Image: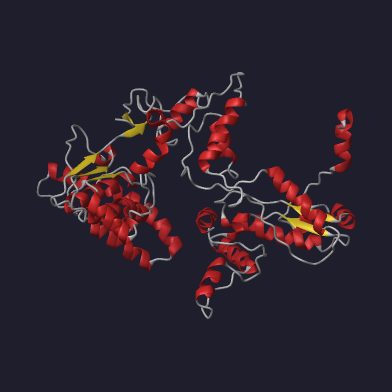
Amino acid sequence: MHGESYESFIGSKLIPVVGNIHESNLGMDIIISQQIAQEIDLIVDSAANTIFDLRYDLALDANVNGSYQLMMFAKKCKNLKLLIHYSTAYANGEREGLLYEKPFMMGESITKEKLTSHSPSAKFPSLNAANELDFVSKLKNSIKNNEFKKIMKELGAERVIDPAIVFYGKGDFPCVLADPNCLVDVVPVDVVVNATMAAIAKHGNLQSPELNVYHVASSFVNTLLSSQLMDYCYEFFSSFPFVTSKGDQVKIIESKLFKCLKEMQGESYESFIRSKLIPVVGNIHEPNLGMDIIISQEIAQEIDLIIDSAANSTLDLRYDLALDAHVNGSYQLMMFAKKCKNLKLLIHYSTAYANGEREGLLYEKPFTMGESITKEKLTSHSPTAKFPSLNAANELDFISKLKNSIKNNEFKKIVKELGAERAKLYGWHDIYSFTKAIGEMVIDNMREDIPIVIIRPSLITTSYEQPFPGWIQGFRVIDPVITFYGKGVFPSIFADPNCLIDVVANQK
């Protein structure tokens, strides 16, 4: 439209000003801020920090103190006709059902809403912005800096959904882990801009001191399945591929895990899959594996095989969480398995690194309750030597008592360090392999007449042949290092060149 005069046109419309929304006068020079306050009649506030797990103090500063400083400045703007503030549809948190477009009032919270809706006389603390800012300020003054940063992180990615789509387009993500039938609520940025313009047109000249809320979302009107989103992404990046720094087009792959089966079944593929796979909501940490009692009874009557691959593979996971996943999880699994009268086999995935600091020839025998690698080493040199037995129930009880006697934030810090110390004491390198070994003890101790197979893979990498060479669900373990080396991101890998690496293809 403007051709060569484009830059001068933009320069006449946009004037960049240095500032900081966290500060008084939004961090602007006092003279500039006074000039702006005298002239403007519209404020559009899109300032935010969209990192979901941002430290609590930084999030409060950006999204709460920032709003306070904005409103203080807005009150100086005598010609102001309208202020538009961008929040998020997810400010509705755990609300369910029909969401009314009304603002949050000071003192409200979603928990309080739920509680009073069931019991009007129930009491719940009010949520107050000033109290939260004051609480964090006092905490900051009373705790060392590094410890404060850690606590703030726990107390309280990149932005939104774009990285997942971009990394898929660049070939970094071969697939995205998601329920294919899950609804994805996304809205194009130009739709948000159009909604903003509509709001300005409607409210800009009313000069009514109202607070209006508008949701800009797809919701259940224009539904989008995660599988549809990935299909659209595949079609788009196939037609308009990214180009590498060398000028080569990036070729992306379609999710092919079930491709062969789909080709075999044709149009009946979806009905075939539904007849074979039945997803059930559950939690391995809970009785009946967290399933509904009727569903769990039906499953217990029908199944003859259990394959247990549930785990949290974070090596330095907090000790209480690792015990819950790998030890209590094994206990709950065995309790359920005993209800399965037709059960012919239970397969449990452990890890080759459950062997910890053992050396030499490793025998394929399960851990039994009371054993530990330190105890093995000690008694092999001195048969009469005494060393504390490793007992699953004692570890769970110890952590439970510790949790009840220490404040929550302090407990989280202590239990992280404690897990690593306990692992080293008993002869394991890390919390993951240590608790997986204890999980084996629980399974062996409870198995009675249930046939058990424990599989201990080493580092699992991409498939060798099936469903196709190089497939793995997700981007994990050793594959990122290999992929980044292949893309030229890692020019080298720091390692002993003569060190043995034990990896195994996932199809094996």
In the image, taking residue 403 as reference, residue 391 lies left or right, namely: left
Is 382 situated left or right of 442 in this image? left
| Residue name at image x 80 percent, y 54 percent | 200
Q: Is residue 225 above or below residue 89?
A: above
351, 416: nearer the viewer? 351
Q: Position of residue 238 (x, y in %)?
A: 57, 26
Assign the C terminus to one quadrant of the image: top left
Give the image quarter of residue 201.
bottom right
Q: Nearer the viewer, residue 444 or 419?
A: 444
Residue 370 versus residue 420: which sits nearer the camera? 370
**Which of the image's four quarters has the N terminus?**
top right
From where the camera sits, is residue 119 visible? yes
Q: Classify residue 400 as left or right of residue 105.
A: left
Name the residue located 56 percent from the left edge and 70 percent from the top edge. 113
Q: Residue at x 37, y 56 (%)?
A: 415
Q: Residue at x 9, y 49 (%)?
A: 384
In the figure, residue 22 lies in which quadrant? bottom right
Which color scheme did the rendering employ for the protein?
secondary structure
